Image: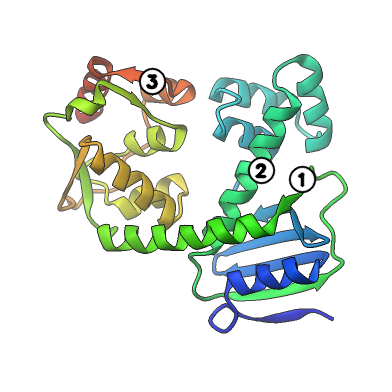
Amino acid sequence: MALQGNLRDFSITQLLNLVHLARKTGALTLQKDPVTTALFFREGKLVYTTSTDHDGHLVGMLARSGKLTADQAKMISNRSAGHSDKKLAMMLINAGTVTQKDIISSIRQDFLEIVYRLFTWSEGRFIFEPNRLADEDAITIAIDLENVILEGSRHVKEWEHLQDELPDLDVALKFTDSPQSQLRNINLNVDEWRMISYISPRNSIRKIAQRIGMDDFRIRKITYGLLEAGLVEIVEPEREPVRPAPSKAVEKAVSHAPAVKRSVIHRLIDRIKRL
């Protein structure tokens, strides 16, 4: 018999504890419009996740974890249309493109990112369906829920801190005139590069998040990191529409996302300011 209710009455921590302690097998589906997320369990362990606002394909996971460049991901996606993730994983391993360890670590990272985001949900509907399994073609891995719950609790505290530091997402950002000395050897991940390509007084933080499909927690975390690094500062937004897609030069930088020298950062900032 399915268990269903509202997260106002039964938190994600309580739900995961129930699955963990009772060693449940089944699927927990949570919905907070417009997002629907499903977590699959086998004998009390998390084995698979999906979410309507998240690219759950293997190629996307490998790209987000830095195992594939943007160019590699695009080429592989074009050539592997119609293949299941399981078949694609074997193809990539046999070709020497990635290792089995790369695939497992990327999938684990992606699953956990989806679950940790749920800890910030204070409302929404849920239903747990016993013995419902993930699709046969899905790549599943076993993740201990006890550690997930502990880390999720820390995630809630981080979320509360970010809300205190950045209570308003309707402000804009601009690049500082004199980035601090710690930018001498800065290392930005793909999401940070994506956000940087849209930073302008014309774009509020909320509009940037909507444009690149990023949730409130992630956009706040990246913004806070850029502020702490001295790369950007908060300004009042100008009344202008969100900028179009980033230039080819910025897209090329995003595809590689390496550690960047300070002089390169300055040139990138100057170029973005002129767009």
Q: Is residue 68 above or below residue 43?
A: above
Residue that mark 3 sits on:
259
Q: Is residue 128 above or below residue 269?
A: below
Q: 131 left or right of 248?
A: right
Task: Give the crowd class for mark 1: few <14, some 14-19, many >=20 residues within 10 Å.
Answer: some
Residue 263's label in the rendered image is none
Query: What separation in Å lies between label 3 and label 1 (alpha carbons)?
Result: 31 Å
**Residue furthest left as drawn:** 177
Look at the numbered disc 2 and give the secondary structure of its residue. Answer: helix
Task: Give the crowd class for mark 3: few <14, some 14-19, many >=20 residues within 10 Å.
Answer: few
Residue that mark 1 sits on:
141
Residue that mark 2 sits on:
108
Q: Are marks 1 and 2 in contact (CB under 8 Å)?
A: yes
Q: Residue at x 55, y 70 (%)?
A: 32
Q: 189 left or right of 61?
A: left
Residue type indicated by callout 1? Ile
Residue type indicated by callout 3? Ala
Residue type indicated by callout 2? Arg
